[in-house]
Amino acid sequence: MRSSIFHLVPLLAATLCAAAPLEPTNFLLVTSNQSSPNYNSSDLQVVSATSLFDPYYQPALLLRLIGPGYGSLPNFTLTSGTLHTTASGPHGVGQYEYNSTVVAGGAELQFLASQQPQGNIALEGGYLVTVDGESDGWTVCDSKLSSRTLWWKGVGGNCTQTWLHAVTKAPY
Ligand SMILES: *[C@@H]1O[C@H](CO)[C@@H](O)[C@H](O)[C@H]1NC(C)=O
Ligand SMILES: *[C@@H]1O[C@H](CO)[C@@H](O)[C@H](O)[C@H]1NC(C)=O
Ligand SMILES: *[C@@H]1O[C@H](CO)[C@@H](O)[C@H](O)[C@H]1NC(C)=O
Ligand SMILES: *[C@@H]1O[C@H](CO)[C@@H](O)[C@H](O)[C@H]1NC(C)=O
Ligand SMILES: *[C@@H]1O[C@H](CO)[C@@H](O)[C@H](O)[C@H]1NC(C)=O
């Protein structure tokens, strides 16, 4: 679909490319305490990979930090301000396209296996995940089952600020 748009409107394509020269179409999400990009995600400071998390088989998947030793990491695409990823359904049954819900302050980033309205997520500079144009509201907070999950403007004393980077290679 994107390539046909580019054929029809070459000028728009050139403008978009100039605005976001490095924007990846399929990426991993990692957290870091640095906001500037690093070509090699292993070299980001305090970097952590993320994976989907489904505490107690709730419908909404969350993102949690995951250390070395994982099997695989989820990858994402971004269209209409919404992140998309593929994951198995509750109890590991079936494969679904999960879509991020409209991000709200004081809540975890959530993904549902249903169509979502226009979202408020974008990539700044082609790598830094923003909400409503802001990049500095992501927090990592202590969550259920001893996990640390990604929030937008989590305010608990257990929350620490982070930046969310879209990268093409896993940091570890
Ligand atoms: C990130 O954390 C490391 C280690 O705690 C620290 O040395 C560094 O200054 C921090 N970077 C930023 C941008 O806060
Ligand atoms: C990325 O950085 C890590 C750690 O600094 C290093 O071991 C690895 O070789 C680098 N990878 C590339 C492709 O430069
Ligand atoms: C993205 O993840 C899916 C399912 O987890 C996998 O089948 C696919 O190969 C991955 N794509 C890339 C480009 O890594
Ligand atoms: C997720 O959103 C996409 C694009 O809007 C849609 O095609 C897909 O059906 C949605 N996923 C589910 C499980 O409904
Ligand atoms: C950490 O902060 C979040 C966000 O305010 C809160 O919901 C959660 O209960 C807190 N976790 C613990 C273990 O206190």
Image: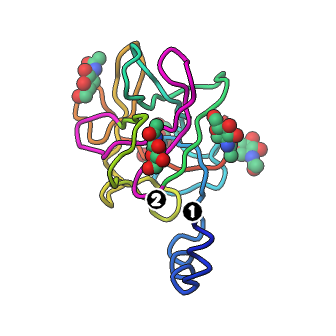
Disc nearer the start of the sequence (1/2): 1
Magenta region includes residue 102:
yes
**Image position of 71 with respect to 33: above or below:** above
Residue shown at 59% from the left, 76% from the top: 6
Q: Is residue 94 visible?
A: yes
Q: Which residue is identified by label 1?
A: 23
Q: Secondary structure at mark 2?
A: strand
Three-letter amino acid code at disc 2?
A: Leu
Three-letter amino acid code at disc 1?
A: Glu
Q: Secondary structure at mark 1?
A: loop
Q: Which residue is identified by label 2?
A: 123
**Image position of 22 with respect to 92: above or below:** below
Ligand 5 appears in which quadrant? Answer: top left
Q: Position of residue 7 (x, y in %)?
A: 62, 80
| Numbered-mark total | 2
Which quadrant would the C terminus be assigned to in this image?
top right
Give whichever of 19, 95 is nearer the camera: 95
Give whichever of 4, 144 is nearer the camera: 4
On screen, residue 98 versus residue 26, left or right, reads: left
Query: How far separated are the C-alphas under marks 1 and 2?
Result: 7 Å
Which quadrant would the N terminus be assigned to in this image?
bottom right
Magenta region includes residue 1:
no
Residue shown at 44% from the left, 21% from the top: 54
Report the magenta residues as a range: 79-108
Mark 2 neighbour class, 10 Å CA radius: few under 14, some 14 to 19, many 20 or more: many
Give whichever of 119, 63 is nearer the camera: 119
On screen, residue 171 versus residue 52, left or right, reads: right
Q: Position of residue 108 (x, y in %)?
A: 32, 34
